[in-house]
Image (spheres, rainbow, N blue to C red):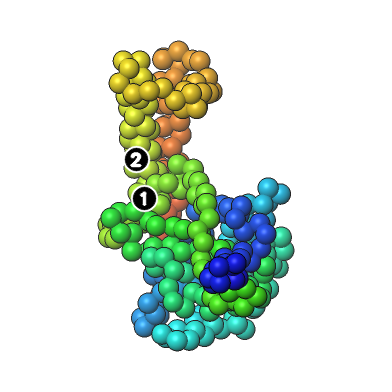
Amino acid sequence: MASSNNQTVLQFVSSSSTAASLSAKVHPLVIFNICDCYVRRPDQAERVVGTLLGSVLPDGTVDIRNSYAVPHNESSDQVALDIEYHHSMLQSHQKVNPKEVIVGWFSTGFGVTGGSALIHEFYSREVQNPVHLTVDTGFRNGEASIKAFVSVSLSLGDLQLAAQFQEIPLDLRMIEAERVGFDILKTTMVDKLPNDLEGMEASMQRLLALIDDVYKYVDDVVEGRIPPDNSIGRFISDTVASIPKISPPAFDKLVNDSLQDQLLLLYLSSITRTQLSLAEKLNTAAQIL
C-alpha cells in the first residue's frame, strides 16, 4: 500500500485470520509412513509428496494422524499431481475412518522447494489453510528436520504477488517404544531391528541418561552454579511425586517378574514359529509324495 511520503510498502496478508496462532501435532505413524514412501519411491523421483489426514482439535491445533503418497512429476517450472489417485485414496481412507479429513500435505527433503507453492495452491482448494509438513529423510547430522508451514500471501495493496511459507509450532511426541523405532531410522544401515530385550535395554540407557541430567541440574542449583528455574523445579517435583513409593526389594521383584513375562512371550513366539515352519515343511513333503 502507498504511504503519505509516496513510498510503496509490501504487505504480508495471512490467508486466514488464525494463521499466526496455528500449531500442529503429528503422530509418529505419519513420519514412519512418509519414510517408507520415500524408500519405495520410483528411481527417477527426487522426493515424495502426499496428503495429510487428521482433524482440527477444539483448541485450533491441527492433529495429523495419517498420510498417503500421491504420484507426481515436477520440473523447474511445473508440477503435475495424480488428482484422480488422490481422490481415490481419500475415499478409501474415509471408508475406514470417516472422521479423518484432509489437513494438508507433506514432502520429503530439507525445507521448502520452488514447486511447493504450486502444490500448496492445489491443496488450498481441497481444504482451507492447509499445513505443509516437510520431513528431511536424509537425517543430516543424525537428526531429522521435521517442520510445519502455512502459506502467507505477499500482496501489494489489493494485488497478490506471491506466497510465503511461514513456519508454525510442531509437536512430535512419542512413547518410548516409538522413540526406539525412530532412533533406528536415523541409522542408514542396520543389520536387524532390535528385539524386545534390546529395545528395553535402549530405553533403560536413555532413562539413566535423563536421570543423570536431572541429578546434575539439581546439584548445580544447590551449589549455586546456575540460577534456579521455578518451572523446571515444579516439573521435577511432579515427576518425583508421580513415582509410587515402594521398597527396593519390591521394586526388584516387580522388574524381575516383568522381565520373566517378556522372556516367556519370546519363548512362546519362538515355539510358534518353529511349529509353523515344521507344519509348512510337512505339508510340502506330503504334496510331493
Relative to 282, say whether 210 is above or below: above
Q: Is residue 85 left or right of residue 185?
A: right
Point out residue 55 in the picture as x, y percentages from the top left corner.
Answer: 66, 58
Point out residue 142 in the picture as x, y percentages from the top left corner.
Answer: 30, 54
Label 2: how many Cα within 10 Å (few below 14, some 14–19, many 20+) = some
Disc 2 to disc 1, how far (Cα)? Answer: 10 Å
Query: Disc 2 on helix, strand or loop?
Result: helix
Relative to 125, say whether 24 is above or below: above
Q: Is residue 156 left or right of residue 194?
A: right
Residue, far front: 5
In the rendered structure, find residue 103 and report the number of the disc placed on it. none
The residue carrying mark 2 is: 202
Please name the residue shown 46% across and 34% down the image: 261
In the rendered structure, find residue 183 and report the number of the disc placed on it. 1
The amino acid pointed to by label 2 is Ala
Point out residue 46 in the picture as x, y percentages from the top left corner.
Answer: 37, 77
The amino acid pointed to by label 1 is Asp
Q: Quadrant of residue 113?
A: bottom left
Query: Disc 1 on helix, strand or loop?
Result: helix
